[in-house]
Structures are given as structure tokens and as C-alpha cells.
Image (tube, helix red, strand yellow):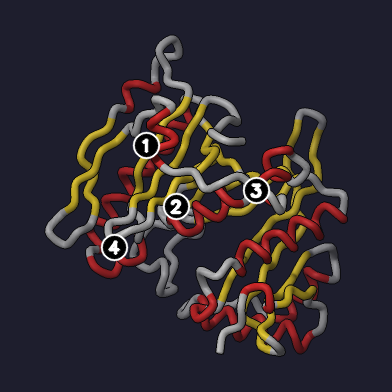
Amino acid sequence: MVKKIDEIEIRIIESPEDMAAVEELEVQIWPGDDPVPYHMLLAVVHNGGVLAGAYDGDRLVGFIFGFLGIFETDDGFKVKHCSHQLGVHPDYQDRGIGYRLKRAQWQLVRQQGLELITWTYDPLESRNAYLNLAKLGAVCNTYIRNEYGEMKDALNIGIPSDRFMVHWWVNSQRVAQRLSRESRKRLDLAHFLAADIEVINTTTLNAAGWPVPKEDRMDKIGNRESQIAMTLFEIPSDYQGMKAGDIELAREWRHYSRTIFELFFHHGYLVTDFVFLPGKNPRSYYVLSQGDITLGG
């Protein structure tokens, strides 16, 4: 029996034996991909990296792994934490374990005196977008085309590996609010529409029930004088299901959204939030704004 979320224990992983278990779990989470070998995990952890696991009793059911990197500022280069992997066993997903692992990473990296954690994720994966942006408070203005080249694992095969790189400023008020015990209430699309914030694109459902891009109003963001301060951009809510059911439509969404996000970022927009509406036909929306703003902090 899977335990309740508060019975799952988060522990720092340091021993070679526990790292071998991480390698085994990687294969279960990302079938077909090459796992990071335990000796590499060991070398990274012994040199400033972070590796933590989620345990159901003695069973490892999730982990988070990252290493030290650098980023450039006006004052030269500084050290940051590069969060490389966050994985949860399929039987334990959608239970808040990923959030708890990220929170543990946040605490450990702050203890190291660092101010920034970065990582990449597929911008069409709504589950990851909701965790990274709405729950954790990361922001993004960087789109990377085909970041990992042609990937052969079951989750990514056949689609260009485009990625967002998000920035998680661990000492910021935004992040502190999202990770506090009294974090903000979940935002609905209605909250944004009530504030006169428009959805900049429209979609229609095809015969199989998948959303198809219809039209957009990207002309609204190009002129600085009439540029909208905040807008919403809809993406598919189940991109993995779409890839399995209609790979050509999934590729269309990749290239369409690539064009849109690159235009947004070129015109100075920042991804600051994410809205997910559950239901029979779930909907997913990115919040993009001029500056680090969103509704509700």
C-alpha cells in the first residue's frame, strides 16, 4: 500500500549503495534513457552537489539531483546550483512528492549560501509547468531549441527536445511566499479574466479531442506603446497523451509554441505563472508578463 504523503520521508543520499538504487529508479522513470551512473552521482555529491531521496519505508520512490555551475552577472561569474533531475516512481506521482523534493533542495542550496537554482523542462509538459511556476515560484525568459538533441527515451522520442530554462531565486519574496506553510490559494482562469487579462491564442478540439492551434494575436506584443502588460497562452494539457495518440499534431504544437515563446521573450516578456483547470477537458495556460508580476504574489 502506498503511504500518505506525510509518511514519505525525505533523506539526503550519500552512500554508494543508496546511489545504486537511484540508478535503478532512473530506469523505471525514464525507460529507454541512459541513467546517470552511481559513481558519477557519488563524485558530484562529494564535490558540492545535492542528492536527496523520497522513501516509502526502505523503498526509494523519488529523488532529486543537481550540481554546481556558474552564471554570468554584471560583476562577473557567480556560482549557482544546476538542478539536473527530479523523478518520482510512476506509482507515486501526483502525490506532492516532487514538491517536497524541490523544497528539500531549496533548503540545502540555501545552506550552501547560493542564491540561484536553474533547470530545464519541456514547456509543453503542463504538470511540470504547474509545479515549477505556480507552486515553486520559478520564472523563465529563456527558450532553448533542441537542447538535448534527438532523445530516444519513451517520453521524448520523435519530438525536438526544446526546453525552458527556469530561474529559481531561492531568497526572493516570490519563492518564500510559494513555499510557506500558508501559500497563496490556487488561481483559476476566472481570476485572470476578471482582471481583464486576455488569452492571446485560441484552440479548437479535433475529432479525437486534442486541442489544435487556431489563431493568435501576437501582433499585440510587438508595439512597445500598446504592448499588453500581462497575457495568457494556452498549451495542451496532456502532451504525453497527444504524442502517443497523434505524433504529427504533437510536432505541430512543438514548432508553433517555439515560435510563440521566442517572440514573447524577444519582446521582453517573462513567464511568471501557470494556470491548470482540471476536468473532463482540462485546460492549461502560461502567464506571461512585462516584468516579474502575476496575480496574488
Q: Earlier in the sequence, mark 3 or mark 4?
A: 3
Kindly check if marks 2 and 1 are in contact, taking CB atoms under 8 A apart as contact: no
Q: Earlier in the sequence, mark 2 or mark 1?
A: 2
Q: Quadrant of the C terminus?
A: top right
Q: Earlier in the sequence, mark 3 or mark 2?
A: 2
Q: Quadrant of residue 51?
A: bottom right
| Nearest the eye: 148 or 271 | 271
* Mark 3 vs mark 1, CA separation in Å: 31 Å
Residue 34 appearing in the image: no
Residue drawn 52% across the image and 73% down it: 93
Q: Earlier in the sequence, mark 3 or mark 1?
A: 3
Provide residue 165's location: percent of width, then percent of height: 57, 47
Say left or right for 44 vs 261.
right
Provide residue 19's location: percent of width, then percent of height: 73, 82
Between disc 2 and disc 1, the foreground one is 1
Residue drawn 80% across the image and 70% down it: 45
Residue 144 appearing in the image: yes
* Mark 2 vs mark 1, CA separation in Å: 13 Å
Name the residue type under label 1.
Ile
- Disc 4 crowd rating (10 Å Cα; few below 14, some 14-19, many 20+) is many
Q: Is residue 231 placed above or below 253 in the rendered structure?
A: above
- Disc 1 crowd rating (10 Å Cα; few below 14, some 14-19, many 20+) is some
Badge 4 is on which residue?
242
Q: Secondary structure at mark 3?
A: loop
Between disc 4 and disc 2, the foreground one is 4
Badge 3 is on which residue?
183
Kindly check if marks 1 and 4 are in contact, taking CB atoms under 8 A apart as contact: no
Residue drawn 71% across the image and 63% down it: 66
| Res 162 label | 2
Q: Earlier in the sequence, mark 1 or mark 4?
A: 4
Name the residue type under label 2.
Asp
Provide residue 261's location: percent of width, then percent of height: 42, 38
